[in-house]
Amino acid sequence: MDNLTFRHSILLVEGLKLSRQSSYPVFIAILGAYVFATISNIALIILISTEKKLRQPMHLLYCNLPVNDILGTTVILPRLLHDILKDESERHITYVECVIQAYFVHIFVAACHYVLMIMAFDRYVAICNPLQYTAIMTNKMVLKLSASAWGFAIVMVSIMLGLTLRLSHCRYKIENPFCDNASLFKLSCENVAINNVFGVIYSAVMACVSILYIFLTYIKIAAVCIKSKNKALNSKAIKTCSTHLAVYLIMYTCGATFIFLHRFPEYSDSRKLASIMLHIVPPGLNPLVYGLQTKEIKQKIAKIWGRKNGNS
């Protein structure tokens, strides 16, 4: 088995099955989506970090999301673009590169859930305990929440990939457009029941905990809004919470579709499309949803746009 593992240190990525005619339009579409997502997320990070009025806990916590979105697009899309222009028999990747890519793919997915959970906590404190908000959501607390979200993602993904790395592999083909944990342990001829069980349980627990936490948080926020007769508070709560909820639903829908289809080989083409959409749709839509729905960011963008038009 060790000889087989050594022999298959160079893997073949199945990628997208495209005709020569369709590969160029798909390449241009994915390249456009990657450039847009990267530029818009970087612009939001720069805007929040340089504008004093935007250096609030809510916006600082949000900065974790565009950082993660840039990671999520960069870890697969440049490689995917490279493979699209190559013949299927020439889409090679080393085993080490594949493991690194899989690691950051799962960091991206896990961090999405945890970052949105800490953002929900921020909204809960702001709306349900407004008088204590500045005392609770200090810069130190923002740093702690951000570190906990990334730290937990790193620990859990490391355990998951560690279980896969213990396996030898006798196959060489990644049946996916990019490397992930399931694609890696499917290379092995050993018993992968532990990997399957851990992967399913971890994915289910992570998804259920995040959706339950956010659901309960919004129930409490809704209860406060119903009891309150303060129209300004209710209006602010609706705007900020609807933005956060929209971002979460975009991520959750794309992720759940990908995980669900991974368990059904007969839908491999749909699974491939869903896996790519997970790294394109949320990173592309999140800056639009958050930037256009957040009053302070929208005003700053309008101000900058007005200056440019005035100068021109």
Image (cartoon, grey):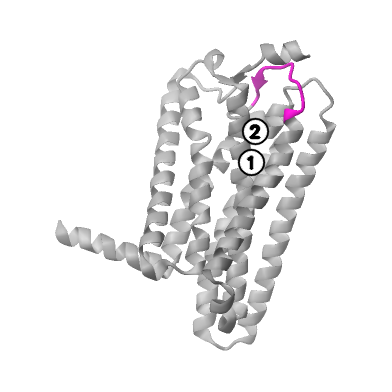
How far across and how far down the image is residue 269, in percent? 62, 29
Categorize mark 2 by other alpha carbons within 10 Å: few (<14), some (14-19), many (20+).
Answer: many
Q: In this view, does 57 lie to the left or right of 149?
A: left
Residue, disc 2: 180
The boundaries of the magenta stretch are: 165-175
Say above or below: 29 vs 83.
Answer: below
- Which circle marks residue 106 in the picture? 1
Q: Residue at x 52, y 46 (%)?
A: 281
> Quadrant location of residue 211?
bottom right
Q: Quadrant of residue 242?
A: bottom right
Q: What element carries label 1?
A: helix
- Report the residue at 48% width, 52% height from top: 66
> Is disc 2 in contact with disc 1, using a CB cutoff of under 8 Å?
yes
The x and y percentages for residue 259 are 69, 41
Residue farthest to the left, as pictured: 312
Name which residue lies at 64% across and 81% down: 224
Residue 220 is left or right of residue 27, and the answer is right
In the displayed structure image, the side of residue 162 where residue 59 appears, left or right: left
Q: Is mark 2 on a helix, strand or loop?
A: loop
Asked whether residue 126 appears in the rendered view, the answer is yes
Task: Looking at the picture, tell me which residue is in the foreground, 267 or 204.
Answer: 204
Tell me where residue 99 appears, x and y as whole percent: 63, 30
Q: Residue at x 42, y 62 (%)?
A: 292
Image location (x, y in percent) of residue 180? 65, 33
Query: What secondary structure do most residues of the magenta stretch adopt?
Result: loop
Spatial CA distance of label 2 from label 1 is 7 Å
Q: Quadrant of the C terminus?
A: bottom left
Three-letter amino acid code of the residue under disc 1: His
